[in-house]
Image (cartoon, rainbow, N blue to C red):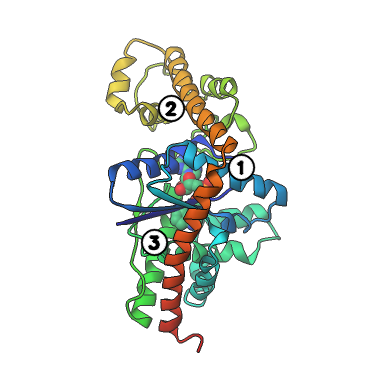
Amino acid sequence: MRILSGIQPTNVVTLGNYLGAMKNFVKLQNEFEDADILVFVADLHSITIPKDRSELKKNIKTLAALYIAVGLDPKKVHLFIQSEVPPHAELSYIIECNSYIGEMERMIQFKEKSQKEGETVTTGLLTYPCLMAADILLYDTDLVPVGADQKQHLELTRNIAERFNNKYGDTFKVPEPYIVKKSARIMSLQDPDKKMSKSDPNPKGYITLLDNINEAKNKIRRAVTDSIGIIKYDEENQKGLANLINIYSLLTNLSIEEIEKKYIGLGYKEFKEDLAEIVGQELEKIQDNYSSILASNELDEILDEGREYALKLAERKLAKVHKKIGLGR
Ligand code: AMP
Ligand code: TRP
Protein backbone atom coordinates (compact mmCIF):
# COMPACT_ATOMS: atom_id res chain seq x y z
CA MET A 1 0.00 0.00 0.00
CA ARG A 2 1.22 3.48 -0.81
CA ILE A 3 0.35 6.60 1.18
CA LEU A 4 1.20 10.11 -0.04
CA SER A 5 0.59 13.67 1.08
CA GLY A 6 2.05 17.15 0.91
CA ILE A 7 1.78 20.54 2.55
CA GLN A 8 2.54 23.95 1.06
CA PRO A 9 5.49 25.82 2.56
CA THR A 10 3.58 29.04 3.20
CA ASN A 11 4.52 31.13 6.20
CA VAL A 12 4.13 28.96 9.24
CA VAL A 13 2.66 25.61 10.19
CA THR A 14 -0.39 25.98 12.43
CA LEU A 15 -1.85 23.70 15.05
CA GLY A 16 -4.61 23.11 12.46
CA ASN A 17 -2.09 21.80 9.92
CA TYR A 18 -0.49 19.71 12.62
CA LEU A 19 -3.66 18.11 13.95
CA GLY A 20 -5.48 17.97 10.60
CA ALA A 21 -2.64 16.67 8.48
CA MET A 22 0.82 16.04 9.93
CA LYS A 23 -0.25 14.11 13.01
CA ASN A 24 -2.28 11.78 10.79
CA PHE A 25 0.80 11.09 8.67
CA VAL A 26 2.58 9.99 11.83
CA LYS A 27 -0.40 7.90 12.90
CA LEU A 28 -0.54 6.16 9.53
CA GLN A 29 3.20 5.57 9.61
CA ASN A 30 2.82 3.79 12.94
CA GLU A 31 -0.35 1.90 12.00
CA PHE A 32 0.71 0.59 8.62
CA GLU A 33 4.09 -0.96 9.24
CA ASP A 34 4.47 -2.16 5.65
CA ALA A 35 3.13 0.89 3.85
CA ASP A 36 5.31 2.84 1.48
CA ILE A 37 4.94 6.46 2.56
CA LEU A 38 5.85 9.53 0.53
CA VAL A 39 5.59 12.97 2.07
CA PHE A 40 6.63 16.14 0.32
CA VAL A 41 6.98 19.90 0.61
CA ALA A 42 4.60 21.28 -2.03
CA ASP A 43 6.75 24.24 -3.05
CA LEU A 44 5.40 24.37 -6.62
CA HIS A 45 1.92 24.73 -5.17
CA SER A 46 2.95 27.62 -3.00
CA ILE A 47 3.98 29.84 -5.94
CA THR A 48 0.44 29.84 -7.36
CA ILE A 49 0.25 32.97 -5.25
CA PRO A 50 3.60 34.74 -5.80
CA LYS A 51 6.06 34.51 -2.90
CA ASP A 52 9.15 36.39 -1.76
CA ARG A 53 12.26 34.41 -2.70
CA SER A 54 14.06 34.33 0.63
CA GLU A 55 10.85 33.70 2.57
CA LEU A 56 10.08 30.76 0.31
CA LYS A 57 13.57 29.27 0.75
CA LYS A 58 13.28 29.57 4.50
CA ASN A 59 9.78 28.09 4.63
CA ILE A 60 10.73 25.07 2.54
CA LYS A 61 13.49 24.15 4.95
CA THR A 62 11.37 24.85 8.01
CA LEU A 63 8.55 22.63 6.81
CA ALA A 64 10.93 19.80 5.89
CA ALA A 65 12.49 19.95 9.37
CA LEU A 66 9.07 20.13 11.04
CA TYR A 67 7.93 16.96 9.30
CA ILE A 68 10.74 15.11 11.04
CA ALA A 69 10.28 17.05 14.29
CA VAL A 70 6.62 15.98 14.64
CA GLY A 71 7.61 12.35 14.38
CA LEU A 72 7.91 11.22 10.77
CA ASP A 73 10.58 8.55 10.81
CA PRO A 74 13.03 8.98 7.93
CA LYS A 75 13.60 5.23 7.99
CA LYS A 76 9.97 4.65 7.16
CA VAL A 77 9.03 7.73 5.15
CA HIS A 78 10.51 9.17 1.96
CA LEU A 79 10.56 12.92 2.41
CA PHE A 80 11.21 15.13 -0.61
CA ILE A 81 10.73 18.55 -2.13
CA GLN A 82 8.23 18.69 -4.99
CA SER A 83 10.21 20.96 -7.31
CA GLU A 84 13.23 18.62 -7.11
CA VAL A 85 11.20 15.93 -8.86
CA PRO A 86 10.44 17.41 -12.33
CA PRO A 87 7.85 14.78 -13.36
CA HIS A 88 5.32 16.53 -11.08
CA ALA A 89 5.22 19.62 -13.29
CA GLU A 90 5.40 17.55 -16.48
CA LEU A 91 2.48 15.31 -15.60
CA SER A 92 0.56 18.35 -14.40
CA TYR A 93 0.75 19.81 -17.91
CA ILE A 94 -0.52 16.58 -19.44
CA ILE A 95 -3.38 16.54 -16.95
CA GLU A 96 -4.21 20.14 -17.87
CA CYS A 97 -4.70 18.88 -21.40
CA ASN A 98 -7.07 16.20 -20.12
CA SER A 99 -9.27 18.29 -17.87
CA TYR A 100 -11.62 21.22 -18.34
CA ILE A 101 -11.54 24.87 -17.37
CA GLY A 102 -15.08 24.51 -15.98
CA GLU A 103 -13.90 21.82 -13.55
CA MET A 104 -11.12 24.06 -12.29
CA GLU A 105 -13.40 27.08 -11.90
CA ARG A 106 -15.80 25.05 -9.79
CA MET A 107 -13.22 24.37 -7.07
CA ILE A 108 -14.20 26.08 -3.81
CA GLN A 109 -10.60 26.85 -2.93
CA PHE A 110 -10.08 28.54 -6.30
CA LYS A 111 -13.18 30.66 -5.82
CA GLU A 112 -12.09 31.71 -2.35
CA LYS A 113 -8.47 32.37 -3.15
CA SER A 114 -9.13 34.14 -6.44
CA GLN A 115 -11.64 36.42 -4.77
CA LYS A 116 -9.03 37.37 -2.21
CA GLU A 117 -6.36 37.98 -4.85
CA GLY A 118 -8.59 40.27 -6.93
CA GLU A 119 -7.31 41.11 -10.38
CA THR A 120 -3.96 39.37 -10.26
CA VAL A 121 -5.09 35.75 -10.22
CA THR A 122 -2.37 33.59 -11.78
CA THR A 123 -3.09 30.82 -14.28
CA GLY A 124 -1.36 28.48 -11.84
CA LEU A 125 -3.99 29.13 -9.18
CA LEU A 126 -6.65 27.91 -11.60
CA THR A 127 -4.73 24.82 -12.73
CA TYR A 128 -3.52 23.96 -9.19
CA PRO A 129 -5.75 20.86 -8.93
CA CYS A 130 -3.99 19.42 -12.01
CA LEU A 131 -0.67 19.67 -10.20
CA MET A 132 -2.18 18.09 -7.12
CA ALA A 133 -3.63 15.27 -9.23
CA ALA A 134 -0.18 14.77 -10.78
CA ASP A 135 1.44 14.59 -7.33
CA ILE A 136 -0.89 11.77 -6.38
CA LEU A 137 -1.22 9.85 -9.66
CA LEU A 138 2.53 9.68 -10.35
CA TYR A 139 2.99 7.20 -7.52
CA ASP A 140 0.03 4.80 -7.79
CA THR A 141 -1.11 6.20 -4.46
CA ASP A 142 -3.74 4.26 -2.49
CA LEU A 143 -4.40 6.64 0.37
CA VAL A 144 -4.12 10.43 0.68
CA PRO A 145 -4.37 11.85 4.23
CA VAL A 146 -5.62 15.46 4.10
CA GLY A 147 -7.84 17.91 5.92
CA ALA A 148 -11.48 18.30 4.86
CA ASP A 149 -10.71 21.38 2.73
CA GLN A 150 -8.88 19.14 0.23
CA LYS A 151 -11.74 16.69 -0.27
CA GLN A 152 -12.97 18.34 -3.46
CA HIS A 153 -9.49 18.27 -5.00
CA LEU A 154 -9.27 14.57 -4.18
CA GLU A 155 -12.59 13.89 -5.86
CA LEU A 156 -11.42 15.75 -8.94
CA THR A 157 -8.21 13.69 -8.92
CA ARG A 158 -10.28 10.51 -8.90
CA ASN A 159 -12.39 11.75 -11.83
CA ILE A 160 -9.31 12.72 -13.80
CA ALA A 161 -7.71 9.31 -13.19
CA GLU A 162 -10.83 7.44 -14.27
CA ARG A 163 -11.30 9.57 -17.35
CA PHE A 164 -7.65 9.11 -18.35
CA ASN A 165 -7.88 5.34 -17.85
CA ASN A 166 -11.00 5.17 -19.99
CA LYS A 167 -9.45 7.18 -22.76
CA TYR A 168 -5.93 5.72 -22.89
CA GLY A 169 -6.22 2.38 -21.12
CA ASP A 170 -5.33 1.50 -17.56
CA THR A 171 -2.65 3.96 -16.43
CA PHE A 172 -3.43 5.39 -13.00
CA LYS A 173 -4.55 3.95 -9.72
CA VAL A 174 -7.66 5.72 -8.39
CA PRO A 175 -6.75 7.05 -4.90
CA GLU A 176 -8.85 7.18 -1.72
CA PRO A 177 -8.90 10.19 0.60
CA TYR A 178 -8.16 9.66 4.30
CA ILE A 179 -9.92 12.33 6.34
CA VAL A 180 -10.20 12.07 10.10
CA LYS A 181 -13.50 13.72 10.98
CA LYS A 182 -12.54 15.06 14.38
CA SER A 183 -9.38 16.77 13.21
CA ALA A 184 -10.54 17.73 9.74
CA ARG A 185 -11.40 21.28 10.72
CA ILE A 186 -9.65 22.89 13.63
CA MET A 187 -11.28 26.28 14.07
CA SER A 188 -9.91 29.74 14.81
CA LEU A 189 -9.42 30.40 18.53
CA GLN A 190 -10.99 33.84 18.09
CA ASP A 191 -13.82 32.99 15.72
CA PRO A 192 -15.04 29.39 15.92
CA ASP A 193 -17.00 29.84 12.69
CA LYS A 194 -13.76 30.21 10.74
CA LYS A 195 -11.12 27.55 10.14
CA MET A 196 -7.79 28.05 11.88
CA SER A 197 -5.61 29.54 9.19
CA LYS A 198 -2.20 31.09 8.86
CA SER A 199 -3.70 33.80 6.67
CA ASP A 200 -5.88 35.02 9.54
CA PRO A 201 -5.04 38.71 10.08
CA ASN A 202 -5.51 38.16 13.83
CA PRO A 203 -2.60 36.01 15.10
CA LYS A 204 -4.54 35.26 18.31
CA GLY A 205 -6.78 33.04 16.16
CA TYR A 206 -4.04 30.53 15.38
CA ILE A 207 -1.12 28.83 17.09
CA THR A 208 1.95 27.92 15.09
CA LEU A 209 4.27 25.05 15.92
CA LEU A 210 7.13 27.50 16.35
CA ASP A 211 5.22 30.02 18.49
CA ASN A 212 6.78 31.18 21.71
CA ILE A 213 5.46 28.69 24.27
CA ASN A 214 4.06 31.30 26.64
CA GLU A 215 2.34 33.17 23.85
CA ALA A 216 0.79 29.94 22.61
CA LYS A 217 -0.49 29.16 26.11
CA ASN A 218 -1.99 32.63 26.35
CA LYS A 219 -3.79 32.12 23.07
CA ILE A 220 -5.51 29.08 24.57
CA ARG A 221 -6.33 30.94 27.79
CA ARG A 222 -7.89 33.76 25.75
CA ALA A 223 -9.71 31.57 23.25
CA VAL A 224 -13.29 32.67 22.63
CA THR A 225 -15.86 30.46 24.37
CA ASP A 226 -19.35 31.32 25.65
CA SER A 227 -21.19 32.16 28.84
CA ILE A 228 -22.78 28.75 29.44
CA GLY A 229 -19.91 27.68 31.64
CA ILE A 230 -20.29 23.89 31.53
CA ILE A 231 -17.65 21.64 29.91
CA LYS A 232 -19.82 19.87 27.38
CA TYR A 233 -19.24 19.07 23.71
CA ASP A 234 -21.96 20.99 21.89
CA GLU A 235 -20.99 22.05 18.37
CA GLU A 236 -24.05 24.24 18.01
CA ASN A 237 -24.26 26.24 21.20
CA GLN A 238 -20.67 25.95 22.44
CA LYS A 239 -18.68 26.03 19.23
CA GLY A 240 -15.53 27.58 20.64
CA LEU A 241 -15.42 25.12 23.52
CA ALA A 242 -16.12 22.17 21.19
CA ASN A 243 -13.06 23.17 19.17
CA LEU A 244 -10.93 23.29 22.33
CA ILE A 245 -12.25 19.90 23.45
CA ASN A 246 -11.30 18.51 20.05
CA ILE A 247 -7.79 19.88 20.37
CA TYR A 248 -7.57 18.48 23.91
CA SER A 249 -8.76 15.07 22.74
CA LEU A 250 -6.38 14.93 19.78
CA LEU A 251 -3.37 15.84 21.90
CA THR A 252 -4.10 13.50 24.81
CA ASN A 253 -5.95 10.65 23.09
CA LEU A 254 -8.69 11.02 25.72
CA SER A 255 -12.18 10.65 24.26
CA ILE A 256 -14.65 13.53 24.37
CA GLU A 257 -16.70 11.70 27.01
CA GLU A 258 -13.62 11.18 29.17
CA ILE A 259 -12.82 14.87 28.96
CA GLU A 260 -16.40 15.90 29.81
CA LYS A 261 -16.31 13.60 32.82
CA LYS A 262 -12.96 14.90 33.98
CA TYR A 263 -14.31 18.46 34.14
CA ILE A 264 -17.69 17.88 35.76
CA GLY A 265 -18.15 20.66 38.29
CA LEU A 266 -15.16 22.60 36.96
CA GLY A 267 -15.17 25.75 34.86
CA TYR A 268 -13.56 27.01 31.66
CA LYS A 269 -10.68 28.47 33.58
CA GLU A 270 -9.44 25.10 34.87
CA PHE A 271 -10.09 23.45 31.53
CA LYS A 272 -8.22 26.11 29.57
CA GLU A 273 -5.33 26.13 32.02
CA ASP A 274 -4.89 22.36 31.55
CA LEU A 275 -5.19 22.63 27.79
CA ALA A 276 -2.65 25.48 27.75
CA GLU A 277 -0.25 23.19 29.58
CA ILE A 278 -0.90 20.29 27.18
CA VAL A 279 -0.39 22.48 24.11
CA GLY A 280 2.73 24.00 25.67
CA GLN A 281 4.26 20.59 26.30
CA GLU A 282 3.50 19.38 22.78
CA LEU A 283 5.09 22.49 21.25
CA GLU A 284 8.12 22.20 23.48
CA LYS A 285 8.72 18.63 22.36
CA ILE A 286 8.37 19.57 18.69
CA GLN A 287 10.58 22.65 19.05
CA ASP A 288 13.35 20.68 20.77
CA ASN A 289 13.36 18.12 17.96
CA TYR A 290 13.24 20.90 15.39
CA SER A 291 16.34 22.62 16.78
CA SER A 292 18.38 19.44 16.85
CA ILE A 293 17.40 18.53 13.28
CA LEU A 294 18.41 21.96 12.02
CA ALA A 295 21.71 21.72 13.89
CA SER A 296 22.63 18.43 12.19
CA ASN A 297 23.26 17.57 8.51
CA GLU A 298 20.63 14.92 8.70
CA LEU A 299 17.97 16.88 6.84
CA ASP A 300 19.90 17.16 3.57
CA GLU A 301 20.63 13.46 3.58
CA ILE A 302 16.98 12.65 4.20
CA LEU A 303 15.86 14.95 1.38
CA ASP A 304 18.44 13.53 -1.03
CA GLU A 305 17.27 9.99 -0.36
CA GLY A 306 13.63 11.06 -0.75
CA ARG A 307 14.31 12.79 -4.05
CA GLU A 308 16.12 9.78 -5.56
CA TYR A 309 13.38 7.42 -4.46
CA ALA A 310 10.55 9.64 -5.74
CA LEU A 311 12.34 10.38 -9.02
CA LYS A 312 12.70 6.72 -9.86
CA LEU A 313 9.00 6.00 -9.38
CA ALA A 314 7.81 9.22 -11.01
CA GLU A 315 9.98 8.89 -14.11
CA ARG A 316 8.73 5.39 -14.67
CA LYS A 317 5.10 6.50 -14.48
CA LEU A 318 5.69 9.53 -16.70
CA ALA A 319 7.30 7.34 -19.37
CA LYS A 320 4.24 5.10 -19.28
CA VAL A 321 1.96 8.13 -19.71
CA HIS A 322 4.00 9.41 -22.68
CA LYS A 323 3.71 6.03 -24.29
CA LYS A 324 -0.04 5.77 -23.77
CA ILE A 325 -0.63 9.20 -25.26
CA GLY A 326 1.80 8.82 -28.14
CA LEU A 327 4.30 11.51 -27.19
CA GLY A 328 7.94 11.47 -28.30
CA ARG A 329 9.66 9.18 -30.79
P1 AMP B 1 -2.42 24.17 3.80
O1 AMP B 1 -1.79 24.88 4.91
O2 AMP B 1 -3.68 24.81 3.33
O3 AMP B 1 -1.45 23.84 2.70
O4 AMP B 1 -2.90 22.78 4.38
C1 AMP B 1 -2.04 21.72 4.66
C2 AMP B 1 -2.83 20.57 5.23
O5 AMP B 1 -3.37 20.93 6.52
C3 AMP B 1 -4.05 20.15 4.39
O6 AMP B 1 -4.20 18.74 4.44
C4 AMP B 1 -5.19 20.85 5.06
O7 AMP B 1 -6.40 20.20 4.83
C5 AMP B 1 -4.78 20.80 6.53
N1 AMP B 1 -5.34 21.92 7.30
C6 AMP B 1 -5.11 23.24 7.12
N2 AMP B 1 -5.78 23.99 8.02
C7 AMP B 1 -6.48 23.12 8.80
C8 AMP B 1 -7.37 23.25 9.91
N3 AMP B 1 -7.70 24.45 10.42
N4 AMP B 1 -7.89 22.13 10.45
C9 AMP B 1 -7.57 20.92 9.96
N5 AMP B 1 -6.74 20.71 8.92
C10 AMP B 1 -6.19 21.79 8.34
N1 TRP C 1 -3.14 21.14 -1.95
C1 TRP C 1 -2.77 20.71 -0.63
C2 TRP C 1 -3.04 21.82 0.39
O1 TRP C 1 -3.11 22.97 0.05
C3 TRP C 1 -1.32 20.32 -0.56
C4 TRP C 1 -1.03 19.25 -1.54
C5 TRP C 1 -0.43 19.41 -2.74
C6 TRP C 1 -1.35 17.87 -1.41
N2 TRP C 1 -0.33 18.22 -3.40
C7 TRP C 1 -0.89 17.26 -2.61
C8 TRP C 1 -1.97 17.11 -0.44
C9 TRP C 1 -1.06 15.89 -2.85
C10 TRP C 1 -2.12 15.74 -0.67
C11 TRP C 1 -1.67 15.14 -1.86
O2 TRP C 1 -3.16 21.53 1.53
* Contact, mark 3 vs mark 2 (Cβ under 8 Å): no
Q: Where 309 falls versus 292 (above or below)?
A: below
Q: Where 106 falls versus 237 (above or below)?
A: below
Q: How many numbered circles are shown?
A: 3
Q: Residue furthest bottom?
A: 329
Real-space CA distance between mark 3 and mark 2, rounded to the nearest whole angstrom = 30 Å
Q: Residue furthest top?
A: 265
Residue 257 as seen in the image, left or right of residue 115: left
From where the camera sits, is residue 206 visible? no
The foreground one among 176 and 6 is: 6
Q: Measuring from the top left, give residue 175's x and y in whole percent.
A: 34, 61
Task: Locate the N terminus and report the quarter of the image it occupies.
Answer: bottom left
Where disc 2 sits, the SS reads helix
Real-space CA distance between mark 3 and mark 1, rounded to the nearest whole angstrom = 25 Å
Precedes in sequence: disc 3 or disc 2: 3
Q: Measuring from the top left, give residue 151's x and y in whole percent.
A: 41, 54
Residue at point 42% right, 48% down? 148
Q: Residues within 10 Å of mark 2 (few under 14, many from 20)?
A: many
Q: Where 253 falls versus 157 (above or below)?
A: above
User: Quarter-wise, where is residue 24 in the image?
Assistant: top left
Residue type pointed to by label 3: Glu
Precedes in sequence: disc 3 or disc 1: 3
Q: Residues within 10 Å of mark 3 (few under 14, many from 20)?
A: some
Numbered badge on residue 199: 1
Residue of label 2: 244
Residue of label 3: 155
Residue at point 48% right, 73% down? 95
